[in-house]
Image (cartoon, grey):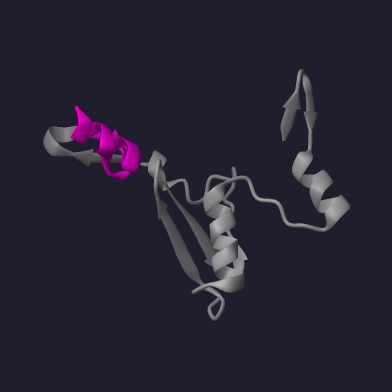
Amino acid sequence: MYNEGDQEIPLAQIIKKKYGLPCVDNDVKAATIAEKEFGIGKDTDDFVCINIGTGIAAGFVCNGRLLSGVHNNAGEIGHMVSTCIATYYARVENLVALKPLLLAVVY
């Protein structure tokens, strides 16, 4: 949904209906679809595409279809909580993603 003031506009549905194009809500899901259509996933119906950049996320393909999850959160692995050194709790993204690692090096 795209919000214009207090009005919600179903932008993805409009694009899908008008142009017949699939719409996804983030770059990792788009990359996963690209891998399924053109890349390493084109010859399989089940695979995981993991992206580590400014965050960490994954796209899951099962039986040839991109999984979205109950609340469209499938693959948002960077938001999982991990127990690490001395029972310090941290989001996985804060431990392994590019931005936090660069900040650790700079500071």
Quadrant housing the C terminus: top left
Residue furthest left in the image: 86
Q: Is residue 63 visible to the viewer in this orientation of the structure?
A: no
Question: Residue, x 52% and y 52% (percent of image)?
Answer: 28
Q: Nearer the viewer, residue 69 or 98?
A: 98
Residue furthest front in the image: 106
Q: Is residue 28 above or below residue 82?
A: below
Which image quadrant is residue 103 in? Answer: top left
Residue furthest top in the image: 5
Residue furthest bottom in the image: 43
Question: Residue, x 40% and y 41% (percent of image)?
Answer: 54
Q: Is residue 21 left or right of residue 51?
A: right
Q: Is residue 70 left or right of residue 40?
A: right
Question: Residue, x 53% and y 78% (percent of image)?
Answer: 44
The magenta segment? 89-107
Can you give x and y, in whole percent of width and height, for residue 78 in the image?
39, 43
Provide the major secondary structure of the magenta segment: helix
Which image quadrant is residue 96 in? Answer: top left
Question: Residue, x 61% and y 71% (percent of image)?
Answer: 37
Quadrant housing the N terminus: top right
Q: Is residue 45 above or below residue 12?
A: below
Can you give x and y, in whole percent of width and height, for residue 19 in the image?
84, 55
Can you give x and y, in whole percent of width and height, for residue 38 in the image?
59, 72
Q: Is residue 31 visible to the viewer in this orientation of the structure?
A: yes
Can you give x and y, in whole percent of width and height, for residue 87 in the image?
16, 34
Q: Is residue 55 above or below residue 61?
A: above
Q: Nearer the viewer, residue 26 or 60?
A: 26
Which image quadrant is residue 99 in? Answer: top left
Does the segment drawn in magenta span residue 29?
A: no
Does the segment drawn in magenta span residue 106?
A: yes
Q: Is residue 89 left or right of residue 73?
A: left
